Image (tube, rainbow, N blue to C red):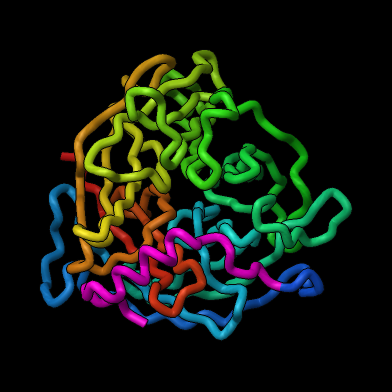
Amino acid sequence: MIFSRGGFRQTLFAAIVLLAGVAPAGSAGSAPVEPVAVSARPITEFHIGRADKQFGPLEFVGGLEMTSPSRDFGALSAFRFLKAGSDFIGVADTGYWFFGTVARDADRRPVGIQNFRMQQMADQGGQPIDEKWEVDAEGLAVKDGIATVGFERNHRVSQFRIDPDNMKAPFRQLDFLVPAWELRQNRGFETVTHSNANGQHQGGLVVVSEKSLDKSGNIYAAIIEGPHRGVFTVKRNDDFDITDGAFLPDGDLLLLERSFTMAGGLKMRLRRIYGESVEKGAVADGPVLLQADMGYQIDNMEGLDVWSRDDGALIVSLISDDNHSILQRNLYLEFILHQD
């Protein structure tokens, strides 16, 4: 069902957000890997009812509204492309891995999702984990065949070997440096991303929480690998919380942010954090590139990836988390980020 901008549905959305995470994650007796049929309706306009393509430095390419008869489909929290613009891996905050492929037309626009499948996260004994608080997966980074996942509630950053046919238990837990008592139960690490390989942090992992605030009201984050490990914060303003992020080729950090208030409704924005401010002890900040409300094709936007298209265009891809609610949607959106 498509969101309206009426107060009734906004009120329901508020209740859903507060209750997010209590939806059942599926039965423990399901098959290790579950093929899932996904239907996708193309989205050709980002600004509803208007043909605008340019939104500041971002140019809308296209998008998809995804639905499925599977009760496990949805709650898509984070994803990364394994093959630029095509094959992807992701995590759902109900404790599932998901894999699939974005299908495209001759003009490189997304037109569908192929070969989508899901697998419930497993414990060390290979048994599916049903306890939501143990598998509330929110952030994901991918490098050299390793998936690094940020979990909240039971806060941790874990590493897994990527095997789309049989994802196993984590083989390593990482020190996330932020004091555990500073992390709010449902506001933990939503961003897990590798820094630039040739930059100051030499490809090391950076994690950013959703809304775990220090005494100044800024958002806890940390560089947890590389030569300059340490805790920093991200400036919080306008009641936006952080839901994902990825480093750009020039070293800046692109953050996806979300806001919901009874007065202003649901909003999303993209903020470019200056790379030089991502350092131990600093308060990182930077300009807003895009902000959108329910007059645009958005929902509960939670996942982001940045990749280069075969023609050299820098692409920003976003997904939403429907919280397994009939009032919300699973969206995939795609933009070109113009650098000049």
Answer whether residue 92 is visible to the viewer in this image.
no
Which quadrant is the N terminus positioned in?
bottom left
Would you identify the image quadrant in which residue 156 lies?
top right
Residue placed furthest toward the bottom? 69
Would you identify the image quadrant in which residue 42 lies?
bottom left
Percent position (x, y) of residue 257?
33, 47
Q: Relative to residue 280, is residue 96 drawn left or right? A: right
Q: Relative to residue 331, is residue 39 drawn left or right? A: right
Q: Relative to residue 130, is residue 337 drawn left or right? A: left
Percent position (x, y) of residue 89?
57, 57
Residue placed furthest toward the right? 125
Percent position (x, y) of residue 107?
29, 70
Q: Is residue 135 above or below residue 185?
A: below
At x 51%, y 72%, the residue is 324
Percent position (x, y) of residue 49?
13, 77
At x 70%, y 45%, the residue is 160
In terms of depth relative to the viewer, which is nearer, 66 or 85?
Answer: 66
At x 37%, y 73%, the residue is 64
In terms of depth relative to the viewer, which is nearer, 147 or 277?
Answer: 277
Residue 142 sits inside the magenta stretch: no
Residue 19 sits inside the magenta stretch: yes
Answer whether residue 239 is visible to the viewer in this image.
yes
Residue stretch rendered in magenta on the structure: 1-26
Q: Is residue 37 above or below residue 214?
A: below
